[in-house]
Amino acid sequence: MKLFRSTKTERPQPVQLSRQEALQCQPVINDSIHVENSGEGDIVLEYPLPLKPFFLSLFQRFQKSYEYPTKKLQLDEMGSHVWKYIDGQTSVKSMIEDFASHYGVTQQEAEQSITAFLVELGKRGIIAMR
């Protein structure tokens, strides 16, 4: 006899893209991101923290003036260089080519660096791929 019912629902499977399709994607910036230029030329991104409803209600209850919690991320020189190309028009492939020529690295090294950077920004909800 089961004491509890299973409430698991099936999640939709993520779309699997080929390498060529992934390189043709265009990163798009989330509208809720605030971008600042630091004094050294680096870029500082301020993005909202994803909170579960329970923690959000606790946060609202104990804060006197409610502002949604945010986090800041400071990009270094290379990250700031790549960030300038995230405009919704430039493909990942052209970003890789520009990065490789600008910093004098191979296409493979540039591809690994750019994709890791974009994946991290995607995990944080800063960008999405179109």
Image (cartoon, rainbow, N blue to C red):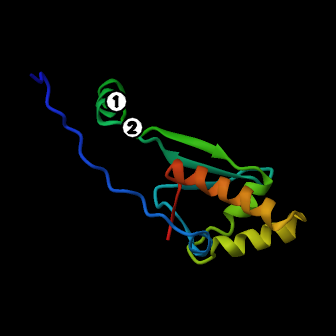
Please report contact status of discs 1 and 2: CB closer than 8 Å, yes or no: yes
Question: Three-letter amino acid code at disc 1?
Answer: Phe
Q: Secondary structure at mark 2?
A: loop
Q: Is residue 68 above or below residue 130?
A: above
Specify the quadrant of the image occupied by residue 27.
bottom right
The residue positioned 52% from the left and 47% from the top of the image is 124
Q: Is residue 61 above or below residue 34?
A: above
Q: Is residue 13 above or below residue 27?
A: above
Residue at the farthest left position: 1
Question: Three-letter amino acid code at disc 2?
Answer: Leu
Seen in the image, is 97 located left or right of residue 128? Answer: right
Q: Which mark is residue 87?
A: none
How many numbered callouts?
Answer: 2
The residue where tag 1 is placed is: 55
The alpha-carbon separation of the residues under discs 1 and 2 comes to 6 Å
The residue positioned 56% from the left and 69% from the top of the image is 18
The percent position of residue 121, horizontal first and vertical second, equals 58, 52
The percent position of residue 53, horizontal first and vertical second, equals 29, 36
The percent position of residue 122, horizontal first and vertical second, equals 54, 54
Category of crowding for the residue at label 2, using alpha-carbon neighbours closer than 10 angstroms: few (below 14), some (14–19), many (at least 20):
few
The residue positioned 49% from the left and 60% from the top of the image is 30
Residue at the farthest right position: 104
Q: Secondary structure at mark 1?
A: helix
Front position in the image: 72 or 62:
72
Category of crowding for the residue at label 1, using alpha-carbon neighbours closer than 10 angstroms: few (below 14), some (14–19), many (at least 20):
few
The residue where tag 2 is placed is: 51
Seen in the image, is 14 located left or right of residue 104? Answer: left
Q: Is residue 86 above or below residue 12?
A: below
Instruction: Name the image quarter holding the N terminus.
Output: top left
Seen in the image, is 71 located left or right of residue 55? Answer: right
The percent position of residue 37, horizontal first and vertical second, equals 69, 55
Seen in the image, is 122 located left or right of residue 50? Answer: right
